[in-house]
């Protein structure tokens, strides 16, 4: 029986703006006219996706059945319905955006080779890439820090930036916000967000996906969007639907108001702790209630930003008057504001819902009056600590076991001090030097893989005291960083007011502390200057150092070399305090193990105190110029102080001026010369190379090959992150990637990082599973019971790098598989974690459970994700790595979530068969797998129509 044909135009209504312009839209209330029940009690986020289904219905990929499925969404129904969601635009940051551009350029090569127009390969939705992930804090606490850090950034990344400039002229819908303008999510809020989308007289909600976990920040403006892997984003760019299972929607009812002195950071850390306990992983979160209505857009953005930390797909706020007020304050046009309001009112989606108006899967209550001053850490963003408990918490964790989140140190060492020396000579202290403790595998991400051994040179300058000692809990990095907080004027003004009072009282920051202020947009220093606060921040060392992610993503730059030596030799538990969103161990710096998330004013306060081992409710920050003790309460700004200055932060003229011309005052960018034309010719480069994913491409996919007599490449434990799989940080000359670059005449000082070289597959494949902290449990324990760390495996009984073993297996035409425990692929969305796995010849990953995005990315690259069932694991099956494996049932007729059989042939010849679940979850994913991945699937679709 033929499915009924859906005609979207039957739901087209229109409204007229004050300038006489008429806009059409797909009316959700009009669904009742075609026999679909009222959707007025559906969560707003579900309704926005429903509108996309209606507008993009083509009776092929998107049908009336899909529309009915979502329109009839039930709060607690089984979630097995697949929804094809077409987004309005895509946002990228440069680390993830460069490899996507490489893939698009390679697709154009294929099109040209097959006699098709290269222009057939073109993003079908607007794509904006913001260069924000490359700048590091090499220079700080000096007037020229921004200039010097940008010069270093361009020196390291010139080849990448040349390629991006080629992309700008080659693709009509691909735009770049150059380095030095801000962070993608803050730029998205302040500039890229259009209110509503308009095309060919039709208007519709702004929706998007982005290649960064914290894309959710835009949820604060009523935009449905979240972070995806680069592979999914690439498909969305090329007009493919994003296939998702219909989600649960958790409503968070915010009541009351924040108390005097509380910040949005205190609130988001409280929400993160609360929602982690509520297990909202993979669900939409939608905020409602009077408390939500009274939050400003920047406060909402802070909550939305950290959705990945509390585990949700989104942290959504509907459009209301506050949204329109923010649009006015950031310089949007009157017509854009009017159209936004008219659209959402016409769709009956305007305003923050009240309690009882919407049917949610679950309702979580939070009284804003219960929020208290907070930090989070020292290793996870969900581990909130009330500010008065910091001293007791650090003291307790110092000697607590690693398994319980501690540092496993002797309690008697807590108050010891250790010397630093320059030049670097052996340090003589109260105890013999101890080896540096291995990092906890499940608490680190984006670790900077630089060598632990300090250089034999150290800094000597007039600015820093060379006779500084270090102790446990000393703050060595204090960073006002991250779009999470630098998009929020209230907390930045609070930091400035606190700094001003501190300077007036004669307080100063200890010279051991590396301070930085890295705003997410150029607007920030303008309003801090207008408020008379920037000079006070500069006096305390918090002058602007860069416009980019910096410390939040691990680009804190290095510590002084003598500090590194003392930390390593004495196993010092040093601390960082930052206004970021993630604090996994070694993310901020490889030698700093205690990392605390805090509001910008608390970052300044802890920099003044110089230690996290303190109770700021009772202990003084320092001594003022009058000899009196100064406490936090003496310099903490009042709400009225902050509110009096907020007007300076929302000046429409400043926003319009700062975003009007990206070439202005940016000679480093404008001076870059790049290639021209529609097709890239791939000049010799160790940064950018033609990807191999389309080699031997044909218009018809090959038959799915069985996986037979495979060998285990690695046996991994629980919570293996995407950074373990594909690290982002730096690497040494002895690594396979380092050897490759040396053989191509690149000096170690010019290696840069894996993240910066994601456009070169030859580097990235050698970096796959090469993280210095990854543990392959195929390798036997050492004499003391510890495990060998680094990217190693066993080949014919010999320990070799994973890359070398993989290449040898491929040469022998032997397929490989990877075994893992729970939560495989957790952490940041990272397409190279799947791409590198494919290029190593891995045919399947068999784990106990997966992180959402990484599972999808594996399928997207044609790697089969399998899941143990009935509580089984590779350890319970006594798999050691010397077996061979076949996966029975892998063929071209596979079905979603099909049960397959893992056949284990042991060394003695015995055979065991166990069931495993295919985590190819949806029908479209089956198609992707049949085609060898989503990229060949999309390319075949495009070329067939060209």
Image (cartoon, grey):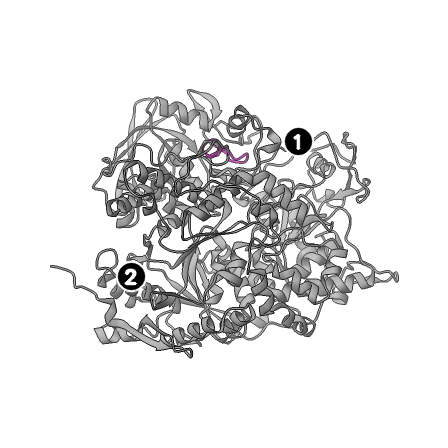
Quarter holding the N terminus is: bottom left
Majority secondary structure of magenta residues: loop
Q: Label 2 belongs to which residue? A: 56
Furthest residue toward bottom: 18
Rendered position, 453 above or below 326: above
| Nearest the eye: 407 or 91 | 91
Residue 685: x %, y % from top left:
49, 32
Which quadrant of the view contains residue 530?
bottom right
Tag 1 near tag 2, CB within 8 Å: no
Seen at 27% across and 38% down, the residue is: 115
Examine the rendering and report whether any part of residue 267 can be seen: no
Lower position in the chain sequence, tag 1 or tag 2: 2
Residue 846 left/right relative to 804? left
Furthest residue toward left: 1
Rendered position, 178 above or below 643: above
Residue 417: x %, y % from top left:
78, 42
Q: Secondary structure at mark 2?
A: helix
Pair 1/2: label in front: 2
Checking the image for residue 243, the label placed there is none
Seen at 79% across and 40% down, the residue is: 461
Q: Residues within 10 Å of mark 1 (few under 14, many from 20)?
A: few
Checking the image for residue 453, the label placed there is 1
Task: Specify whether residue 840 is painted magenta.
Answer: no
Q: CA distance from mark 1 to mark 2?
A: 57 Å
Magenta residues, as a range?
764-776
Q: Residues within 10 Å of mark 2 (few under 14, many from 20)?
A: some
Task: Specify whether residue 775 is painted magenta.
Answer: yes
Which quadrant of the view contains residue 631?
bottom right
């Amino acid at each position: 029986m033929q499915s009924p044909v859906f005609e979207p135009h039957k739901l087209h209504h229109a409204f007229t703006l004050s300038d006489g312009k008429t806009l059409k839209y797909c009316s959700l209330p009009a669904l009742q006219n075609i026999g679909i029940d009222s959707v007025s009690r559906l969560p707003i986020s579900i309704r926005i996706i429903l509108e996309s289904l209606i507008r993009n219905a083509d009776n092929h990929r998107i049908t009336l059945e899909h529309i009915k499925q979502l329109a009839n969404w039930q709060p607690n129904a089984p979630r097995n319905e697949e929804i094809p969601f077409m987004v309005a635009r895509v946002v990228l940051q440069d680390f993830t955006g460069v490899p996507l551009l490489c893939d698009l350029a390679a697709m154009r090569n294929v099109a040209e080779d097959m006699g098709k127009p290269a222009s057939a390969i073109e993003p079908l939705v607007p794509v904006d890439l913001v260069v924000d992930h490359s700048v590091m804090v090499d220079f700080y606490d000096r007037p020229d820090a921004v200039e010097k850090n940008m010069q270093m950034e361009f020196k390291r990344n010139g080849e990448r930036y040349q390629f991006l400039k080629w992309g700008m002229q080659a693709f009509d819908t691909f735009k770049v916000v150059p380095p030095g303008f801000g962070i993608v999510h803050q730029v998205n809020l302040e500039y890229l967000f259009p209110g509503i989308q308009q095309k060919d007289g039709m208007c519709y909600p702004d929706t998007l996906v982005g290649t960064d976990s914290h894309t959710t920040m835009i949820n604060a403006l009523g935009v449905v969007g979240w972070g995806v892997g680069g592979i999914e984003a690439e498909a969305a760019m090329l007009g493919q639907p994003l296939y998702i299972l219909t989600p649960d929607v958790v409503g968070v009812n915010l009541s009351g108001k924040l108390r005097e002195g509380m910040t949005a950071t205190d609130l988001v850390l409280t929400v993160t702790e609360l929602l982690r306990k509520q297990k909202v992983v993979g669900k939409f979160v939608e905020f409602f209630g009077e408390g939500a209505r009274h939050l400003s857009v920047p406060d909402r953005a802070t909550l939305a930003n950290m959705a990945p930390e509390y585990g949700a797909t989104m942290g959504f706020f509907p459009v209301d008057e506050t949204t329109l007020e923010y649009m006015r304050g950031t310089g949007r046009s009157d017509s854009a504001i009017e159209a936004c309001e008219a659209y959402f009112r016409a769709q009956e989606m305007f305003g923050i819902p009240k309690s009882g108006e919407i049917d949610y899967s679950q309702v979580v209550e939070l009284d804003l009056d219960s929020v208290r001053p907070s930090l989070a850490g020292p290793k996870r963003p969900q581990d909130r600590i009330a500010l008065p408990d910091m001293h007791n918490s650090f003291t307790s964790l110092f000697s607590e076991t690693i398994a319980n989140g501690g540092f496993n140190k002797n309690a008697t060492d807590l108050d010891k001090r250790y010397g630093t020396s320059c030049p670097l000579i052996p340090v003589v202290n109260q105890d013999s030097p101890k080896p540096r403790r291995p990092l906890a595998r499940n608490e680190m991400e984006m670790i900077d893989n630089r060598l632990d051994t300090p250089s034999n040179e150290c800094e000597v300058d007039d600015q820093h005291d060379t006779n500084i000692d270090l102790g446990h809990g000393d703050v060595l990095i204090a960073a006002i960083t991250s779009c999470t907080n630098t998009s929020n004027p209230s907390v930045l003004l609070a930091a400035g007011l606190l700094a001003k009072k501190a300077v007036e009282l004669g307080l100063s920051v200890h010279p051991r502390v590396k301070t930085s202020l890295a705003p997410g947009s150029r607007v920030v220093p303008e309003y801090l200057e207008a408020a008379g606060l920037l000079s006070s921040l500069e006096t305390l060392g918090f002058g602007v150092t860069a416009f980019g992610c910096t410390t939040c993503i691990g680009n804190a730059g290095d510590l002084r070399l003598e500090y590194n030596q003392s930390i390593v030799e004495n196993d010092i538990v040093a601390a960082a305090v930052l206004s970021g969103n993630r604090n996994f161990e070694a993310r901020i710096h490889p030698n700093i193990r205690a990392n605390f998330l805090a509001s910008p004013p608390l970052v300044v306060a802890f920099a003044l105190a110089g230690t996290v081992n303190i109770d700021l409710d009772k202990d003084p920050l320092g001594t003022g110029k009058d000899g009196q003790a100064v406490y936090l309460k003496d310099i903490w700004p009042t709400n009225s102080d902050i509110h009096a200055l907020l007007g300076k932060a929302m000046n429409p003229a400043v926003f319009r001026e700062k975003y009007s011309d990206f070439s202005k005052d940016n000679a480093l960018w404008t001076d870059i010369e790049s290639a021209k034309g529609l097709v890239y010719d791939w000049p010799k480069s160790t940064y950018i190379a033609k990807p191999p994913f389309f080699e031997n491409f044909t218009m018809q996919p090959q038959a799915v090959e069985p996986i037979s007599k495979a060998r285990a490449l690695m046996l991994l434990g629980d919570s293996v992150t995407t950074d373990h799989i594909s690290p982002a940080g730096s690497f040494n000359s002895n690594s396979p990637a380092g050897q490759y670059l040396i053989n191509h005449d690149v000096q170690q000082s010019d290696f840069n990082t894996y993240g910066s070289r994601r456009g070169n597959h030859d580097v990235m494949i050698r970096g796959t599973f090469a993280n210095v902290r990854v543990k392959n449990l195929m390798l036997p324990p050492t004499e003391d019971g510890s495990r060998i760390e680094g990217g190693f495996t066993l080949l014919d009984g010999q320990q070799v790098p994973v890359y070398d073993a993989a290449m040898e297996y491929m040469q022998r035409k032997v397929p490989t598989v990877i075994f893992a425990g729970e939560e495989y692929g957790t952490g940041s969305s990272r397409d190279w974690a799947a791409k590198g796995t494919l290029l190593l010849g891995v045919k399947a990953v068999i784990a106990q459970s997966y992180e959402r995005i990484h599972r999808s990315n594996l399928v997207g690259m044609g790697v089969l994700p399998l899941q143990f069932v009935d509580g089984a694991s590779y350890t319970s099956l006594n798999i050691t790595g010397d077996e061979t494996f076949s996966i029975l049932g892998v063929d071209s007729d596979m079905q979603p979530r099909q049960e397959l059989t893992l056949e284990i042939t042991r060394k003695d010849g015995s055979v065991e068969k166990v069931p495993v679940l295919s985590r190819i979850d949806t029908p479209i994913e089956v198609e992707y797998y049949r085609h060898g991945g989503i990229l060949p699937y999309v390319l075949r679709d495009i070329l067939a129509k060209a």
